Amino acid sequence: MTVHNIESIDQYKETIAKHPLVLLDAFATWCGPCKAIAPLIAKWAQDPEFKDDVHFAKFDVDAVPDLAQELGIRAMPTFIIFKNGEKVGDLLGANPGGLLNLIKKFQADKTEEADKTEKPTDE
């Protein structure tokens, strides 16, 4: 899987509605820390550990300013985690360790929920 580029509010809404777990990267082309962490995000999007569970998406705050405003983006990069269409977490800044922990936290929650729904009950 790749990091998908969001180019409109409608595309953003469709993405968070369609995918159970989304990591959204709000970036700017002129942002040094954004450029520094982008290859790592692309690597994680390809990683078998995440590619089936996490939908990686990004948007340029200058290209889609109405989305940046709707999400309250004030600094870049800002990473937002959406679970079942709802914002459940965020992280400001290019902090690879913190971001990885955030992704794994909600990925684990998703896995636990799947385990609960797949197990038959003895009723």
Image (tube, helix red, strand yellow):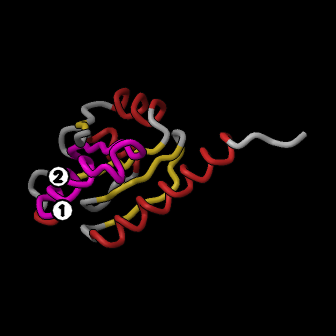
- In terms of secondary structure, where does tag 2 sit? loop
Residue type, mark 1 in image: Ile
The N terminus sits in image quarter: top left
In the rendered image, residue 14, in percent from the top left (x then y), is placed at: 41, 28
The CA distance from mark 2 to mark 1 is 12 Å
Highlighted range, magenta: 34-61
In the picture, measured across the screen, residue 111 lies left or right of residue 91, that is right
In the picture, measured across the screen, residue 115 lies left or right of residue 82, that is right
Q: Nearer the viewer, residue 105 or 85?
A: 105
Q: Nearer the viewer, residue 110 or 3?
A: 110
Which residue is at a point 34% across and 57% down the rendered structure image? 79
Q: Which image quarter: residue 65?
A: top left
In the picture, measured across the screen, residue 19 lies left or right of residue 79, that is right
Query: Residue 56, labelled with which disc?
Result: none
Which residue is at a point 27% across and 69% down the rendered structure image? 96
Which residue is at a point 20% across and 50% down the rendered structure image? 42
The C terminus sits in image quarter: top right
Residue type, mark 2 in image: Ala
Q: Is residue 42 magenta?
A: yes
Q: Is residue 69 magenta?
A: no
Q: Which image quarter: residue 57?
A: top left
- In terms of secondary structure, where does tag 1 sit? helix
What residue is shown with label 2?
28
In the rendered image, residue 77, in percent from the top left (x then y), is placed at: 25, 60
Q: Earlier in the sequence, mark 2 or mark 1?
A: 2
In the rendered image, residue 114, in percent from the top left (x then y), is placed at: 60, 44
Counting labels gives 2
- Evaluate if marks 2 and 1 touch, with contact meaning CB atoms under 8 Å apart: no
Q: Which image quarter: residue 18?
A: top left
Mark 1 is surrounded, within 10 Å at the Cα level, by few (under 14), some (14 to 19) or many (20 or more) other residues, namely: some
Query: Residue 37, labelled with which disc?
Result: 1
- Outermost residue toward the right in this view: 123
